Amino acid sequence: MSSAYPEIYLVRHGQTEWSLSGRHTGRTDIPLTLAGEEAARKVASRLPAIDFAAVWSSPSERAKSTSALAGFGDARVIKDDLAEWNYGAYEGVTTKDILAQRPTWQLFRDGCPDGETAADVGARADRIISELREVNGNILIFSSAHFLRVFAARWLGLPPQCGAHFVLDTTSISILGYEHDLSEPVIRRWNQV
């Protein structure tokens, strides 16, 4: 289903050891696993044969590697606002271990000590949305799961906490766009693996 309006293609980075084990990976640069590299190489063949007016990436090595292995390394522009959630004290810690200390903790509601809240991540997403609406054409974005989940919520005009309702697998492709006109942002496809 193609659209007469611009579409935003979101690609979550390939698998890393920490994404595989469920450790929160915000600002720590963890390389892709061999499986993550192989999946990243297949991303280009899973995208439609269209020209992208812009290719943007998170500054993380995992996102940059995914974009390069997918064949977009030369075209990509690094956008700091696309960085993954800053998990602060929870960097490298699994949800299971956090819940052992704080049984009622929820990332999207409570944020992270010494890190970001959902509102902080939402403000970064809003800046990216403002920038991409100035581009006349399709955009390809490489980033991480929790940021992209908040990004999707903000795209729809929902509070950033609503990102909790969108799940993303590694090297998944999602498409944001519009329905009847540019005032109706929608999710056209989600978490395609």
Image: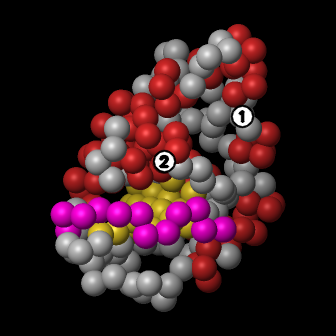
Res 101 quadrant in image: top right
159 lies left or right of 93 = left
Q: Residue at x 65, y 55 (%)?
A: 169
- Which element is circle 2 on? helix
- Residue 84 seen: no
Q: Is residue 5 left or right of residue 95?
A: left
Percent x, y for residue 107?
55, 28
| Marking on residue 23 | 1
Separation of marks 1 and 2 at Cα, in angstroms:
17 Å
Q: Which residue is mark 2?
A: 149
- At 65% from the left and 12% from the top, the residue drawn is 102
Looking at the rendered structure, the kind of residue marked 1 is: Arg
Q: Tell me which secondary structure the magenta stretch mostly adopts.
A: strand
Q: Position of residue 134 (x, y in %)?
A: 19, 64
The number of numbered discs placed on residues in the rendered structure image is 2
Q: Could you tell me residue 126's position as x and y percent?
A: 28, 45
| 184, 4: nearer the viewer | 184
Segment colored magenta: 182-193
Q: Is residue 49 above or below residue 41?
A: below
